[in-house]
Amino acid sequence: MSKLDKDQVIAAFTEAYTAVNGKAPAIEAKGGWYSVDGGKNMRLADLDTLTAELGSSKPAKETKTAAEKPKNVAEKKPAAVKKAAKAPAKKKAKKSDFSVKAFWADKILEQSSEAKLPR
């Protein structure tokens, strides 16, 4: 494992990020962890690999599609809320005779006929 120079890695990452996104990233460093634009914390080695990914053309397209995905997810959220509203209605209509206490009592007695049930 080679030692990475913090200043060189951050400078290279800033250049690659600016080339792809058109703006400089806000990098916060705290205890050996680096956060880019308030995102997920990562180590210096992760920043180095991300620099290589930003340098190639394929990950640049993936970052654009990743930016589009939250819009699609936001559109799908109302549908998820509607499903959640329907789910409790089904639970109210369905009754069950299952009892956890009775289940464990049967299970204990099946394992050993000499076993005593808990209080």
Image (cartoon, rainbow, N blue to C red):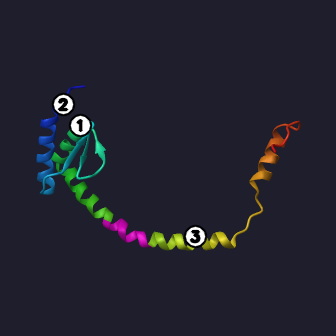
The residue that label 1 is drawn on is 44
Instruction: State the image coordinates of residue 85 (x, y, percent, origin top left).
Output: 54, 73
Picture quadrant of residue 72: bottom left
- 117 on left or right of 84: right
Residue stretch in magenta: 71-78
Nearer the camera: disc 3 or disc 1: 1
Residue that appears at 76% across and 59% down: 98
Question: Observer-nearest residue: 32 or 20?
Answer: 32
Say if the magenta span includes residue 49.
no
User: Label 2 to label 3, Cα distance in Å?
Assistant: 52 Å
Which residue is disc 3 drawn over?
A: 87
* Image position of 9 with respect to 99: above or below: above
| Main secondary structure of the magenta stretch | helix
Amino acid type, label 2: Leu
Label located before the other in sequence (3 or 1)? 1
Where is mark 2, residue-wise? 4
In whole angstroms, how far apart are the C-alphas of marks 3 and 1?
Answer: 45 Å
